[in-house]
Amino acid sequence: MLLAYRKSVPMFATAVLLMGGLISAAHAGDDDDERMPAVKNALFQAECGSCHVAYPARLLSAASWRAMMSGLDKHFGSDASLDAESAREIGAYLEKNAGRDRYAASGKLILRITETRWFQREHDEVSARTWKNPKVKSAANCAACHTQAVNGKYSEHDIRIPR
């Protein structure tokens, strides 16, 4: 019995280590140095990117994107209405490329990327003074600090905080 126990402990420890490695690898994509897929929909890039960075679709859930697209006439204080065909194409693109709910907080439908747990965790060291800088204007202005945001790159190596 003791011999069987001695043989099973190393096997169990090995299994635990392997599982830990797999879990770590699965979460490695959550690093702030990761490259978010560049927008691959020309219409989304043209329409949404004309006012702000065309945010990576995976930053919100499909339900959040559906809600966003259904209220474009009141899009954060602006009328961003689209013709029906454009709205369908962009909506389909966003839903197909949407993120999982891991970005949502407590099941609440989130329309602002800046309100996701992911965004808040990634930017927790940014001071209120930085957000108020006239060159930054708001947390939604990714391109103010992330010099490669338009290319889908949000690496800390490409950050330049405006002075």
Image (cartoon, grey):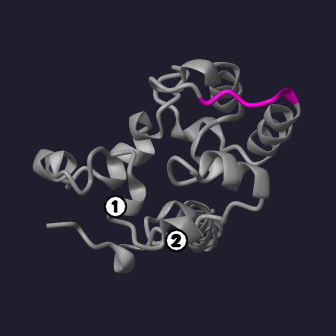
Q: Which of marks 1 and 2 is nearer the N terminus?
A: 1
Q: Which of 106 and 82 is in front in this view?
A: 82
Q: Position of residue 38 (x, y in %)?
A: 66, 66
Magenta stretch in the rendered image: 80-84
Residue under numbered circle 1: 144
Residue at 17%, 45% in the rendered image: 132
Residue at 23%, 57% in the rendered image: 135
Above/below status of 96 relative to 54:
above
Is there CB contact under 8 Å for labels 1 and 2? Answer: no
Q: Where is residue 133 in the image (x, y as percent from the top left)?
A: 16, 52
Determine if the magenta segment contains residue 28.
Answer: no
SS under mark 2: loop
Residue under numbered circle 2: 153
- What's the amino acid at mark 2? Lys
Q: Nearer the viewer, residue 22 or 148?
A: 148
Based on the displayed image, in which of its 4 quarters is residue 138 positioned?
Answer: top left
Residue 24 in sight here: no
Based on the displayed image, in which of its 4 quarters is residue 101 positioned?
Answer: top right
Determine if the magenta segment contains residue 82.
Answer: yes
